Image (spheres, rainbow, N blue to C red):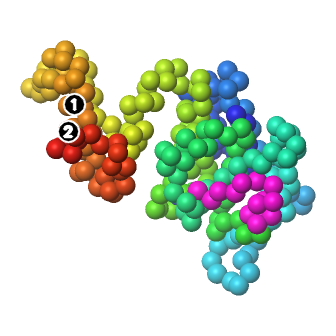
Amino acid sequence: MRIDVFSIFPEYLAALDLSLIGKARQDGLLDVRVRDLRDFTDDRHRTVDDTPYGGGAGMVMKPEPWAQALGTALDGAAEEGARPTLIVPSPAGEVFTQQTAYELAAEDHLVFACGRYEGIDERVLEWAGEHFDVRPMSLGDYVLNGGEVAVLAMVEAIGRLVPGVVGNPESLVEESHSDGLLEYPVYTKPSQWRERPIPEVLLSGNHAKIARFRRDEQLRRTSERRPDLIARLDPSTLDKADKAT
Ligand code: 6GU
Protein backbone atom coordinates (compact mmCIF):
# COMPACT_ATOMS: atom_id res chain seq x y z
CA MET A 1 0.00 0.00 0.00
CA ARG A 2 1.24 3.48 -0.88
CA ILE A 3 0.58 6.28 1.63
CA ASP A 4 1.41 9.94 0.86
CA VAL A 5 1.26 12.49 3.69
CA PHE A 6 1.48 16.27 3.12
CA SER A 7 2.10 18.53 6.11
CA ILE A 8 3.85 21.76 7.08
CA PHE A 9 5.26 19.81 10.07
CA PRO A 10 6.66 16.65 8.47
CA GLU A 11 8.73 16.06 11.67
CA TYR A 12 5.49 15.12 13.44
CA LEU A 13 5.28 12.08 11.20
CA ALA A 14 8.73 10.80 12.24
CA ALA A 15 6.95 8.35 14.54
CA LEU A 16 5.93 6.41 11.42
CA ASP A 17 9.57 5.18 11.28
CA LEU A 18 9.06 3.30 14.57
CA SER A 19 7.60 0.06 15.81
CA LEU A 20 5.16 -2.01 13.76
CA ILE A 21 4.58 0.58 11.03
CA GLY A 22 8.32 1.34 10.72
CA LYS A 23 9.00 -2.40 10.36
CA ALA A 24 6.26 -2.73 7.71
CA ARG A 25 7.91 0.10 5.77
CA GLN A 26 11.29 -1.64 5.96
CA ASP A 27 9.67 -4.89 4.82
CA GLY A 28 8.18 -3.11 1.80
CA LEU A 29 4.55 -3.68 2.89
CA LEU A 30 3.87 0.04 3.32
CA ASP A 31 5.36 2.69 1.02
CA VAL A 32 4.96 5.81 3.21
CA ARG A 33 6.05 9.14 1.67
CA VAL A 34 5.94 12.22 3.91
CA ARG A 35 6.35 15.57 2.15
CA ASP A 36 6.63 19.17 3.38
CA LEU A 37 3.80 21.25 1.92
CA ARG A 38 6.14 24.27 1.81
CA ASP A 39 8.19 22.51 -0.87
CA PHE A 40 5.22 23.19 -3.17
CA THR A 41 5.21 26.98 -2.73
CA ASP A 42 6.99 29.29 -5.15
CA ASP A 43 7.49 32.50 -3.13
CA ARG A 44 10.51 33.46 -1.07
CA HIS A 45 8.60 33.12 2.22
CA ARG A 46 7.14 29.71 1.35
CA THR A 47 3.66 31.01 2.21
CA VAL A 48 0.94 28.43 2.78
CA ASP A 49 -1.79 30.56 4.39
CA ASP A 50 -3.72 33.80 4.01
CA THR A 51 -6.60 35.69 5.66
CA PRO A 52 -10.16 34.37 5.28
CA TYR A 53 -12.62 35.98 2.84
CA GLY A 54 -15.63 37.19 4.82
CA GLY A 55 -13.45 37.94 7.82
CA GLY A 56 -13.04 36.05 11.07
CA ALA A 57 -10.24 34.79 13.26
CA GLY A 58 -7.29 32.75 12.04
CA MET A 59 -5.82 31.92 8.68
CA VAL A 60 -6.83 29.66 5.81
CA MET A 61 -4.51 27.40 3.81
CA LYS A 62 -4.03 28.69 0.24
CA PRO A 63 -5.13 26.50 -2.67
CA GLU A 64 -2.05 26.69 -4.94
CA PRO A 65 0.49 24.76 -2.78
CA TRP A 66 -2.14 22.07 -2.13
CA ALA A 67 -2.87 21.64 -5.84
CA GLN A 68 0.86 21.31 -6.59
CA ALA A 69 1.36 18.84 -3.74
CA LEU A 70 -1.65 16.66 -4.47
CA GLY A 71 -0.71 16.64 -8.16
CA THR A 72 2.54 14.84 -7.29
CA ALA A 73 0.57 12.16 -5.44
CA LEU A 74 -1.24 11.46 -8.73
CA ASP A 75 1.93 11.47 -10.86
CA GLY A 76 3.38 8.15 -9.80
CA ALA A 77 -0.04 6.57 -9.17
CA ALA A 78 -0.24 2.79 -9.59
CA GLU A 79 -2.28 2.86 -12.79
CA GLU A 80 -3.66 5.41 -15.19
CA GLY A 81 -7.16 6.43 -14.09
CA ALA A 82 -6.77 5.02 -10.56
CA ARG A 83 -8.55 7.17 -7.96
CA PRO A 84 -6.55 7.27 -4.72
CA THR A 85 -8.47 8.05 -1.52
CA LEU A 86 -7.72 11.54 -0.18
CA ILE A 87 -8.24 11.69 3.57
CA VAL A 88 -8.54 15.18 5.01
CA PRO A 89 -8.29 15.13 8.83
CA SER A 90 -10.79 17.58 10.27
CA PRO A 91 -13.01 17.83 13.34
CA ALA A 92 -15.75 18.55 10.76
CA GLY A 93 -15.24 15.15 9.09
CA GLU A 94 -17.06 11.85 9.29
CA VAL A 95 -15.97 9.89 12.40
CA PHE A 96 -13.11 7.45 11.78
CA THR A 97 -13.95 4.02 13.27
CA GLN A 98 -12.57 0.48 13.11
CA GLN A 99 -15.00 -0.07 10.22
CA THR A 100 -13.35 2.84 8.35
CA ALA A 101 -9.92 1.35 9.09
CA TYR A 102 -10.98 -2.01 7.56
CA GLU A 103 -12.33 -0.26 4.45
CA LEU A 104 -9.22 1.87 3.93
CA ALA A 105 -6.84 -1.07 4.60
CA ALA A 106 -8.17 -2.61 1.36
CA GLU A 107 -7.10 0.41 -0.76
CA ASP A 108 -3.90 0.56 -2.85
CA HIS A 109 -3.16 4.25 -2.38
CA LEU A 110 -4.09 6.66 0.43
CA VAL A 111 -3.20 10.35 0.52
CA PHE A 112 -3.44 12.43 3.72
CA ALA A 113 -3.67 16.24 3.55
CA CYS A 114 -2.89 17.74 6.97
CA GLY A 115 -4.55 21.09 7.46
CA ARG A 116 -3.48 23.63 10.07
CA TYR A 117 -5.03 26.95 11.10
CA GLU A 118 -8.73 27.20 10.28
CA GLY A 119 -8.48 24.67 7.45
CA ILE A 120 -7.88 24.40 3.70
CA ASP A 121 -9.63 26.57 1.07
CA GLU A 122 -12.79 24.57 0.27
CA ARG A 123 -12.14 24.74 -3.49
CA VAL A 124 -9.15 22.41 -3.07
CA LEU A 125 -11.49 19.64 -1.86
CA GLU A 126 -13.93 20.34 -4.72
CA TRP A 127 -11.12 20.16 -7.31
CA ALA A 128 -9.60 17.09 -5.64
CA GLY A 129 -12.93 15.29 -6.09
CA GLU A 130 -12.17 15.09 -9.82
CA HIS A 131 -9.12 12.91 -9.16
CA PHE A 132 -9.52 11.37 -5.71
CA ASP A 133 -12.22 9.84 -3.51
CA VAL A 134 -12.22 12.65 -0.95
CA ARG A 135 -13.02 11.74 2.67
CA PRO A 136 -12.89 14.38 5.42
CA MET A 137 -12.28 12.34 8.60
CA SER A 138 -12.48 13.16 12.32
CA LEU A 139 -11.06 11.17 15.23
CA GLY A 140 -13.87 12.29 17.53
CA ASP A 141 -15.61 15.26 19.04
CA TYR A 142 -12.70 17.41 20.19
CA VAL A 143 -10.31 19.79 18.43
CA LEU A 144 -6.63 19.22 17.64
CA ASN A 145 -4.35 21.96 16.31
CA GLY A 146 -3.81 20.19 13.01
CA GLY A 147 -4.20 16.91 11.18
CA GLU A 148 -0.76 15.43 11.97
CA VAL A 149 -1.64 13.63 15.21
CA ALA A 150 -4.83 12.34 13.60
CA VAL A 151 -2.80 10.98 10.66
CA LEU A 152 -0.50 9.11 13.06
CA ALA A 153 -3.57 7.49 14.61
CA MET A 154 -5.26 6.68 11.30
CA VAL A 155 -2.12 5.31 9.58
CA GLU A 156 -1.47 3.06 12.57
CA ALA A 157 -5.09 1.81 12.71
CA ILE A 158 -5.15 1.18 8.93
CA GLY A 159 -1.57 -0.07 8.49
CA ARG A 160 -1.87 -2.82 11.11
CA LEU A 161 -4.81 -4.28 9.15
CA VAL A 162 -2.77 -4.57 5.94
CA PRO A 163 -1.99 -8.29 5.46
CA GLY A 164 1.48 -9.18 6.77
CA VAL A 165 1.94 -6.08 8.96
CA VAL A 166 0.81 -7.80 12.19
CA GLY A 167 2.79 -11.03 12.54
CA ASN A 168 0.00 -13.09 14.11
CA PRO A 169 -3.31 -12.17 12.39
CA GLU A 170 -5.18 -14.00 15.21
CA SER A 171 -4.42 -11.03 17.44
CA LEU A 172 -6.64 -8.89 15.20
CA VAL A 173 -9.65 -11.15 15.78
CA GLU A 174 -10.23 -10.78 19.52
CA GLU A 175 -9.37 -7.11 19.97
CA SER A 176 -11.74 -4.30 20.95
CA HIS A 177 -14.17 -3.22 18.21
CA SER A 178 -13.47 -6.19 15.92
CA ASP A 179 -16.95 -7.57 16.78
CA GLY A 180 -18.53 -4.26 17.84
CA LEU A 181 -17.76 -4.88 21.52
CA LEU A 182 -14.95 -3.81 23.84
CA GLU A 183 -12.26 -6.37 24.63
CA TYR A 184 -12.48 -8.65 27.70
CA PRO A 185 -10.01 -8.09 30.61
CA VAL A 186 -6.71 -9.97 30.52
CA TYR A 187 -4.46 -11.34 33.30
CA THR A 188 -0.97 -12.88 33.57
CA LYS A 189 1.26 -14.33 36.29
CA PRO A 190 1.38 -14.24 39.25
CA SER A 191 -2.07 -15.79 39.81
CA GLN A 192 -2.26 -14.02 43.19
CA TRP A 193 -1.00 -10.40 43.40
CA ARG A 194 -1.48 -7.95 46.30
CA GLU A 195 -4.27 -10.11 47.66
CA ARG A 196 -6.00 -10.16 44.30
CA PRO A 197 -6.58 -13.54 42.67
CA ILE A 198 -7.33 -13.83 38.97
CA PRO A 199 -10.89 -14.97 38.07
CA GLU A 200 -10.96 -18.69 38.95
CA VAL A 201 -12.55 -19.81 35.70
CA LEU A 202 -9.32 -18.91 33.84
CA LEU A 203 -7.53 -21.74 35.71
CA SER A 204 -10.31 -24.29 35.07
CA GLY A 205 -9.04 -25.53 31.70
CA ASN A 206 -12.69 -25.51 30.56
CA HIS A 207 -12.45 -23.68 27.24
CA ALA A 208 -16.20 -23.29 26.73
CA LYS A 209 -16.58 -21.80 30.20
CA ILE A 210 -13.64 -19.44 29.62
CA ALA A 211 -15.12 -18.29 26.30
CA ARG A 212 -18.47 -17.64 28.03
CA PHE A 213 -16.78 -15.70 30.86
CA ARG A 214 -14.89 -13.52 28.36
CA ARG A 215 -17.96 -12.87 26.26
CA ASP A 216 -19.96 -11.87 29.39
CA GLU A 217 -17.17 -9.52 30.42
CA GLN A 218 -17.18 -7.93 26.94
CA LEU A 219 -20.92 -7.34 27.17
CA ARG A 220 -20.74 -6.04 30.76
CA ARG A 221 -17.92 -3.62 29.98
CA THR A 222 -19.46 -2.38 26.79
CA SER A 223 -22.86 -1.74 28.47
CA GLU A 224 -21.13 0.12 31.28
CA ARG A 225 -18.61 2.19 29.30
CA ARG A 226 -20.11 2.45 25.83
CA PRO A 227 -23.91 2.01 25.83
CA ASP A 228 -23.89 3.69 22.40
CA LEU A 229 -22.08 0.63 20.99
CA ILE A 230 -24.70 -1.74 22.45
CA ALA A 231 -27.45 0.27 20.78
CA ARG A 232 -25.67 -0.09 17.41
CA LEU A 233 -24.98 -3.86 17.66
CA ASP A 234 -26.24 -6.08 14.89
CA PRO A 235 -28.73 -8.32 16.84
CA SER A 236 -27.66 -11.35 14.76
CA THR A 237 -24.19 -11.20 16.37
CA LEU A 238 -25.73 -11.93 19.80
CA ASP A 239 -26.28 -15.53 20.90
CA LYS A 240 -28.85 -16.84 23.38
CA ALA A 241 -26.52 -16.63 26.37
CA ASP A 242 -25.54 -13.07 25.39
CA LYS A 243 -29.17 -12.01 25.65
CA ALA A 244 -29.42 -13.55 29.12
CA THR A 245 -26.39 -11.47 30.24
CL1 6GU B 1 -8.94 14.50 12.24
N1 6GU B 1 -8.27 16.95 12.96
C1 6GU B 1 -8.28 17.97 13.81
N2 6GU B 1 -7.62 19.07 13.50
N3 6GU B 1 -8.92 17.96 14.96
C2 6GU B 1 -9.56 16.82 15.26
C3 6GU B 1 -9.58 15.72 14.43
C4 6GU B 1 -8.92 15.82 13.26
N4 6GU B 1 -10.31 14.75 14.99
C5 6GU B 1 -10.72 15.24 16.13
N5 6GU B 1 -10.28 16.50 16.31
Q: Quadrant of the rendered structure where residue 56 is?
A: bottom right
Q: Is residue 87 visible?
A: yes
Residue 129 in the magenta stretch? The answer is yes
Which residue is located at x 37 percent, y 55 percent? 232
Q: Which residues are magenta?
A: 124-137
Q: Where the C terminus falls, by quadrant?
A: top left
Which residue is located at x 72 percent, y 54 percent? 133
Q: Residue furthest top?
A: 205
Q: Where the N terminus falls, by quadrant?
A: top right
Where residue 212 is drawn, which disc sits there? 1
Label 2 sits on a secondary structure element that is helix
User: Which of the marked residues, 1 or 2, is nearer the chain's N terminus?
Assistant: 1
C-alpha span from label 1 to label 2: 8 Å
Which residue is located at x 82 percent, y 37 percent? 78
Callout 1: CB less than 8 Å from ligand 1: no
Front disc: 1 or 2: 2
Image x and y of residue 146, in percent: 60, 57
Looking at numbered disc 2 in the image, what kind of residue is underneath it? Ala
Looking at numbered disc 1 in the image, what kind of residue is underneath it? Arg
- Check contact, mark 1 vs mark 2: CB within 8 A: yes
Q: Where does label 2 land, which residue?
A: 241
The one nearer the camera, 46 or 98, is 98
Image x and y of residue 46, in percent: 83, 58
The one nearer the camera, 137 or 18, is 137
Residue neighbourhood size for the residue with mark 2, other residues' Cα within 10 Å, grouped as few (<14), some (14–19), many (≥20): few
Q: Residue furthest bottom?
A: 54
Residue neighbourhood size for the residue with mark 1, other residues' Cα within 10 Å, grouped as few (<14), some (14–19), many (≥20): some
| In this view, 164 is above or below 62 | above
